[in-house]
Image: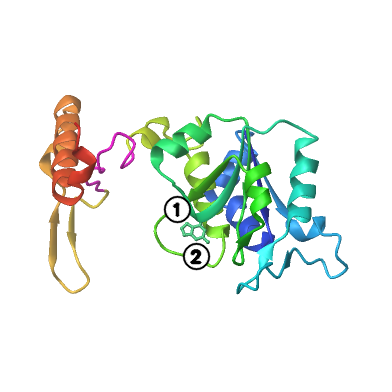
Amino acid sequence: MRIDIITVLPELVEPFVQESILGRAQKKGLVEIHVHNLRDYSTNRWRRVDDYPFGGFAGMVMQCEPIDRCISALKAEREYDEVIFTSPDGEQFSQPMANELSLKKNIIILCGHYKGIDWRIREHLITREVSIGDYVLTGGELAAAVMTDAIVRILPGAIGDEQSALSDSFQDNLLAAPVYSRPKQYTAVDGTDWGSVPDILLSGHEARIKEWELQQSLERTRRLRPDLLEGK
Ligand code: 6GU
């Protein structure tokens, strides 16, 4: 898979995609992530990519030309399955959408900025507008990072333990069960007993542990996110 991210702030996105699981997934050859500086495609002598909106509205608008030139250059090299624009008015990002996008071969994520982008870009180049939630960010970079992270971590081989991406919260519309590590019993710095690991997890009974995990997941989902169980 290949993800091309177009942004006016490559220095914000680049380090994020080189770290941790995203960095490792690229080294393993599971994904190529390329970050492009939109200003490199400006023909303006100050490398501008925005201008005032017609009609006397407030704010600045990202112009057609740099975005058209950048996306045209990418499309000349390969075909893209999706050209995604990050925008608070987009379709809400979700685990099913991450799953769907992780099956694509090549996608472009264009990070929105300023007041918006020239409407003609949406009409002619964008195949999908995606928001990561009902709040407004100063730019689409964090949204692009969030989407890239969610997409790449579920690529087969990206996570050491193949099972663990499948047992995530939301992957089956259930919240994850509690997990514990050593020590079995913990006494906190202030002397409080934080209790012990549930016996069942130390029992070695694989089937009973699975059942416990499912019951815990169902109980937490019913209590914290009953909406996820609707229609189940
Ligand atoms: Cl994709 N962009 C911006 N600017 N704000 C957002 C968003 C995206 N998703 C939620 N808020």
Principal SS element in the magenta part? loop
| Stretch of the chain drawn in magenta | 168-180
Vertical side of 58 occupied by 208: above or below: above
The span from disc 1 to disc 2 (Cα, nearest Å) is: 10 Å
Residue drawn where x is 17% and y is 46% of the image: 220
Residue drawn where x is 13% and y is 69% of the image: 192
- Colouring scheme, one of rainbow, by chain, secondary structure, one colour: rainbow
Furthest residue in direction top, as rendered: 207
User: Residue 179 in magenta?
Assistant: yes
Q: Are marks 1 and 2 in contact (CB under 8 Å)?
A: yes
Ligand 1 under 8 Å from disc 1 Cβ: yes
Residue drawn where x is 66% and y is 64% of the image: 61
User: Residue 49 in magenta?
Assistant: no
Numbered-mark total? 2
Hey, what amino acid is under mark 2? Leu
| Residue bearing mark 1 | 132
Residue drawn where x is 40% and y is 36% of the image: 96
Instruction: Indicate left or right for 200 with 7 as reference.
Output: left
Q: Earlier in the sequence, mark 1 or mark 2?
A: 1
Where is residue 215 drawn, in percent x and y?
13, 36
Vertical side of 176 occupied by 48: above or below: below
Where is residue 79 drawn, in percent x and y?
71, 30
Where is residue 130 drawn, in percent x and y?
50, 48
| Residue bearing mark 2 | 137
Say which element carries label 2: loop
Instruction: Indicate left or right for 119 with 87 as reference.
Output: right
